[in-house]
Amino acid sequence: MEFLQNAKTGIRGLPGDSSCALHERHRLAPRPWQAGAFEQIPMVVCQRRQEREREARFKLKFARATFLRQLRTAYGNEVRGLRRDVNPDGHTATLRDIRRYCRQVDLPVHISDLWGSLDADGDGRVRMEELCSQRAEALAKFKEWARERFGRATGIWESPEAIRARAKRRGQGSWVSESKMLVAAFAEALRELGWPGVHHPEERAFVFTSLDSMGCSLITVEDLDWLDRWQPSEFLAADPKPEAWVELKELLVKTYQHPLRAWRMLDRDSSNRIAWTEFRDVCKKVRYGGDIIGAWRALDVDMSGYITMREYDPASEELLTSFKEWADSNFGSVRHCFKALDSDRSGSVTFPELKRACHKMKWLGNVRTLFDCLDIDSGDRRNRDAATGKRAISLEELAFLDSWNIEPRPEVAQMEDDLAESEAKRVLSTDKNFQLIKHSDEAKAKAEDGKGGSDLCKSKSGPLPSPGQRPKTHEELPVMKRRFTTERPKSQGSLRRAPGTAAKLHDCNAKRNKQRAEMRDRRPHTDNAWLRSYTSFEAVEARR
């Protein structure tokens, strides 16, 4: 199998190495009837599976990056795009909303890939924290502060500090509206009210740009009412509590004897991901009375909405990942590995069988720890080996690794994210429909600034003078440039032709006829010459 794989893939080793690629006419080279055997080589099967997983992961990242970049380019940020177009005046988006918006802007992504990348927890809705976790966290903390201070966010608008800020602007003559409030005045009112986020530029920018739905640096009472109607996840406004996670982990290890066995109880669907609801239910099951939300925030550092085995217990994740990669590379899958390990065909694998196979195939992990973690129902004697009565691992306890999604290394994940961002930028920059939308927004902005319009419509004399400025005199004005550089035709004045006009017209007509004849000669000749001859003969007969 090894020489067959090397001959097919063309992998060449060092001089004198027996595993180098073979020539197609070599007596040991694979024959055409052995092509099917190559596809069954465990390492080839593993490589093909990894390529499919890598391609699927890149499709998800590319679809998400394209969608979010389009929202940021068209509306400034993701929350504003959600409020204005994806789900007007809403807080979540369904699959129908995403499909309608992508069809409306003609976004070049697959809806299935986009939905799979946005709906991380699989609840059928895309919340704000799944679109932009940092903005959602800042808004949730701001709402929690407003609720503790006024009972609701709209109470800020009716506070004496906000009323004074609006009155101050009206007194200066810079603002006259009662239904809208400048962001600067809103920030001044929040500073007087003692909002802690006003001293953090990033958090302040997240809150103000998310509440400003039209991007005009204005806050209305409707924006605060929209914030009141939002029901964020209960862990968004909480702070991480590492000590709470330490207490919870000690309780889980005490209950299940090992962190990996506890993870198996947490990850019931064997997806290598635990959502917030699964984590909360298990904490209630083990009767943990501490800060569950703080423990979750200590685990979910990247605010992805789920935790993986790498965030839960890096040592156990390294052990399982190493065993899965070893099984895939040597047997093609974990199921095939189980069939190979079960030498007596008893339907279970004991510890001696597992240890013997791992040492023979040179797996360097801790076999005892792996066996203890995989054998979940060790207390049930019905699941022991039928021949020896010893503890054994069944296929169901081991097959979950086949559906286990191994997270890429941080450097690989960062490289994939950068590649997806660059590809999304390239696709959106070359898309014609998106260019039209982008250019129209730029033209609108230029028109508002007084810089838009065509060059032919711009005044060459400069802008109009302000009321307090002296207008320019006639001598100071610049000379107006002509729109057309060609000279205008002179008036004929008389109907009589100048001498030599007839000869010039004759030369022009002759030149034009010569050009037409050359164009006729350049036409491609077709194969229907017989048809032209026949029609010419019929025309002659009719003329006779």
Image (cartoon, grey):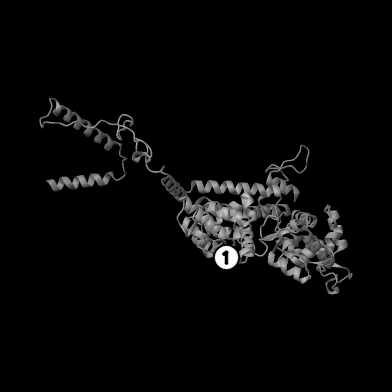
Measuring 55% from the left and 49% from the top, which residue is drawn there? 424
Figure check: 281 above or below 133: below
Measuring 38% from the left and 43% from the top, which residue is drawn there? 453
Which residue is labeled 1 in the image? Answer: 228
Residue 16 at least partly seen: yes
Residue 110 at least partly seen: no
Q: Characterize the local packing of mark 1: few (<14), some (14-19) or many (20 or more) Cα atoms within 10 angstroms.
A: some
Residue 447: x and y in percent read 41, 46
Residue 498 lies in quadrant? top left
Amino acid of disc 1 = Asp
Residue 405: x and y in percent read 70, 58
Front in this rendered view, residue 118 or 140: 140
Front in this rendered view, residue 237 or 534: 237
Measuring 13% from the left and 29% from the top, which residue is drawn there? 502
Residue 393: x and y in percent read 82, 66
Residue 507 lies in quadrant? top left
Left or right: where 155 falls relative to 236: left
Figure check: 452 above or below 276: above
Residue 439: x and y in percent read 44, 47
